[in-house]
Image (cartoon, rainbow, N blue to C red):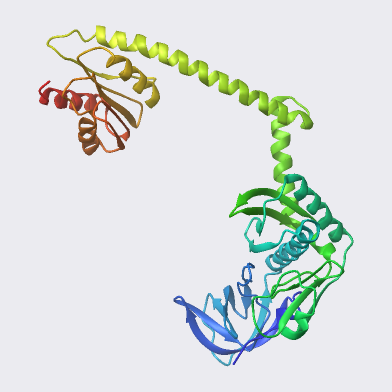
Amino acid sequence: MKTERIYYTEPARREFDALVIEATEYEGAPAVVLDRTAFYPTSGGQPYDVGRLGPTEVLNAVDDGERVLHVVRAPLSAGQAVHGEIDWARRFDHMQQHTGQHVLSAAFDRLLGNRTMSFHLGTESSTIDLAREVAPTDIERCVDEANRVVWENRPVTIRFASPEEAARLPLRKEPVREGPLRLIEVADFDLSACGGTHVANTGEIGLIAVTGAEKFRGGTRVTFVCGGRALRALRVYHDAVAGAVRSLSVLPHELPDAVGRLQGELKQTRKTIARLQSDLAVHEAGRLLAACPATGEVRHVVAVVDGWDASGLKSIASALIAQPDVAAVLSGGSPAAVVVARSPGLPLDANGVLQQLLARFGGRGGGKSELAQGAGLSGDPRDIAAAARELLRSVRL
């Protein structure tokens, strides 16, 4: 027995009465089939409804061909009469986003001839994938047109048509399913085959706002929000801009230039720090060599160096092995970073030494035979240094 789908003709219906015609399971959870339902199952890019059926919660609604499976928190019995209640806040949000998508997609199609290839309604925002790339100015033009239709509060109507009737109608997109079609019409703007839930008038969409656009599979993926989501997004952007304006002591329209200047200053500062760190690394390498006089042909420089990050340790090690006959193991930080290095010509596998340290103290890393580095080692840095000294002594250099 198939389920009568109330949402097809009454998308604003919040409550209904029904009969459980089958008690079953879905992916290990209790589920029921009703003779009629207002719960929308996931389909066509729109997520499922939730709510209540009698004494239990509806956690999911699944399209099962001619039936709708209602996944419930607690089992219900076949033959049981139940009263259903839709989570209206969630349903209305979905109606705003889905109808907003129809209007926005129609705007791209009418103004640019750019067809929507797919649609996804997410929990925070939604996306449409357009067939071709679109310029930012054209996106804004289409958003303005879509919102004009919203604010004109045009009626959104539902009707049904046979395939033969639909073939004679100016549908925005050719339908992919066979049999009778459910059509959603935005007066004098859009006509599309769709099984989703929609508002009764475009004014209920409230506002359509595009929050992002990116190249995607030869076209453009447009991210947008409608209604309540648009209001929440506006608050987030307002708070972010207001905070940045206060921090930088600029007016809102001056913010982009101020951020650009900061980025330029930061880039220059990083270059200066890198140059100074490189110069300091040479001096630090000299200090370490002076504290480790040669007692044989090869000098073993094993040290815990505080205040240097992994990049700095690598700079010091590089300065050390620029001198002949040096084998070095430097560590620092918590968890520790380690660099193992050797001068050209020495028969030491730096990566092999590093891997033995990683096997003992954990962490990750790798490199080449002349220089290798690791990070995330645990344990006392002095213990790591002591283990490194033993490893270097075990190698005939």
Q: Is residue 316 visible?
A: yes
Kindly identify the residue that appears in the image at 72 percent across and 36 percent down.
241
Q: Position of residue 379 (x, y in %)?
A: 27, 32
Q: Is residue 15 left or right of residue 35?
A: right
Q: Position of residue 217 (x, y in %)?
A: 58, 55
Q: Position of residue 259 (x, y in %)?
A: 67, 28
The one nearer the camera, 90 or 215, is: 215
- Image quadrant where one finds the N terminus: bottom right
- Count of numbered badges drawn on the protein: 0
Kindly identify the residue that appears in the image at 79 percent across and 59 percent down.
107
Image-quadrant location for residue 137:
top right
- Image quadrant where one finds the C terminus: top left
Q: Is residue 58 above or below residue 254?
A: below
Q: Is residue 309 visible?
A: no
Image-quadrant location for residue 201:
bottom right
The one nearer the camera, 310 or 345, is: 345
View extreme (right): residue: 152
Q: Is residue 134 left or right of residue 151?
A: left
Kindly identify the residue that appears in the image at 59 percent across and 85 percent down.
67
Q: Is residue 15 above or below residue 91?
A: below
Q: Position of residue 143 (x, y in %)?
A: 79, 53
The one nearer the camera, 295 or 144, is: 144
Q: Is residue 237 above or below residue 35?
A: above
Q: Is residue 82 left or right of residue 209?
A: left
